[in-house]
Amino acid sequence: MPEESPLIQSLRTAVTAAPSDVPLRVHLAELLLDAGHHDAAVTEAAVALQHAPGDRLARALMTRAMSPSSPSAPPQNVTPEPAQAPTAPPQHAAEAGPRTGFNWQAAEDQIGDVIPPRFVEAPLSTDGSGDPGDAAAWDVTAPGPVRLADVGGMQDVKERLEAAFLAPMRNPELRKLYGKSLRGGLLLYGPPGCGKTFIARAIAGELGANFLSVSVNDVLDMWIGNSERNMHEIFQTARRQAPCVVFLDELDALGAKRSRTAHSGMRNTVNQLLTELDGIDSAANDGVFVLAATNVPWDVDIALRRPGRLDRTLLVLPPDAAAREAILHYHLSQRPIAGVDLRKLAKATDGLSGADLAHLCETAAESALLDSARTGTVRMISMKDLLNAAATITPSAEPWFATARNVAMFANEGGAYDDLVAYLKKRRKL
């Protein structure tokens, strides 16, 4: 095997410093091929194709490197020209032999839908950078019309959000005057179906910020290292799209207690999330606001809730009377109703979550529909339909409160769940 020339060695150093520079790597592979280093040329061409699967020069060079002959002419086109009369020295004629008379482009088009390109792994971007941080990679929603005013009732929740999160962000000068820090994020917790995601979108609307919702499916990957990379790229996307609210849904799945996690990959994902949250107060994270939601905050790793990370917590409870009335009005507004007293219905549905109320309206509509089908006469949804439906629905939050009661009684170190304790005492559930 011939020794590498000083030029090739210099190009190797340059490629090491800029591994995603596809033209530089293709040039190195071409020099290696011309110098007789076929295996090394194949390796460099393969890496170039991983970064830029559509690069014509890299694909042509790979075809040359893997052909039986020893190519020496620079790749110009993926599709070779028809064979010409030999005008070059014998070695050039030998090179043209295997390609003469065969339409490679036509063959590639014929099998393209059956056999995927070699060395290609679902490109993340079209510029060959390997960084999926642009709009096509993650679903970043533009600032929406939803505001806190659209959240019915929940006045206590709105006031706490205003004091702990929104007011400092809206008033940077006052924040600077009082030394108010914006490090960390906000953790919303409470029983399922009570509108935590809707509140997060309303906060994004209040801030006029983009919204990036992240679930466990967006992060976890079967291949080692990919989950951590996904977590980093999500935050990189938010930084590019700032101002942006990153909403971590089901935080207990993304940030479970590492002491209970047997799989090292999951622990590494939590570690990566901690690293990203540590940068919330850095210049690179200006305009990135982190919100998270969970039904089981006691299963979240304790390190995620230390000061500077998700240090603000907000309990989101089943809707109060005003909120229930607003939710019922929303779900009945597009249905045929008659004689419905929303205030009375809201009082009769105490303890139901927002999801329960939506189910109630569906059940009442189904009852009226079936009755109309049996009698052959279309009728409106009545108050009786709604009250009968309410009588059949068990509050879905009750099992959650059964578990939360034990946490409030025996695991409230540091007063993390004081709001929950106060609510349970008010409802005489503690």
Image: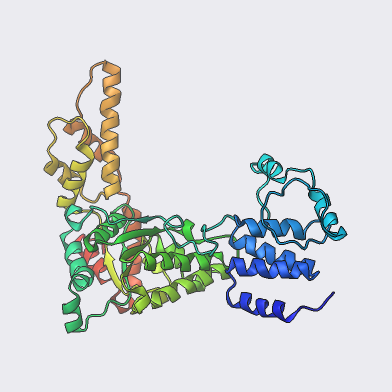
Residue at figure coordinates x 50%, y 72% from the top left: 258
Please state the horizontal and vertical placement of residue 141, each as a whole percent of the image.
34, 55
Relative to residue 233, is residue 194 drawn left or right? left
Please state the horizontal and vertical placement of residue 262, each as a whole percent of the image.
57, 69
Q: Is residue 371 above or below residue 428?
A: above
- Image quadrant assignment for residue 298: bottom left
Relative to residue 83, is residue 276 drawn left or right? left
Q: Is residue 352 above or below residue 368?
A: below
Q: Pick the residue in front: 135 or 210.
A: 135
Farthest residue toward the front? 87
Q: Is residue 14 above or below residue 105?
A: below
In this orientation, does residue 68 appear? no
Residue at figure coordinates x 35%, y 55% from the top left: 399
Relative to residue 350, is residue 230 drawn left or right? right
Report the label total: 0
Please state the horizontal and vertical placement of residue 423, each as a whole percent of the image.
22, 64
In this orientation, does residue 357 appear? yes
Relative to residue 423, is residue 409 drawn left or right? right
Residue at figure coordinates x 79%, y 70% from the top left: 37
Please state the horizontal and vertical placement of residue 143, each as a whole percent of the image.
28, 57
Quarter of the rendering occupied by the N terminus: bottom right
Residue at figure coordinates x 52%, y 67% from the top left: 229
Farthest residue toward the right? 90
- Image quadrant assignment for residue 254: bottom left
Q: Pick the residue in front: 223 or 12.
A: 12
The color scheme shown is: rainbow
Quarter of the rendering occupied by the C terminus: bottom left
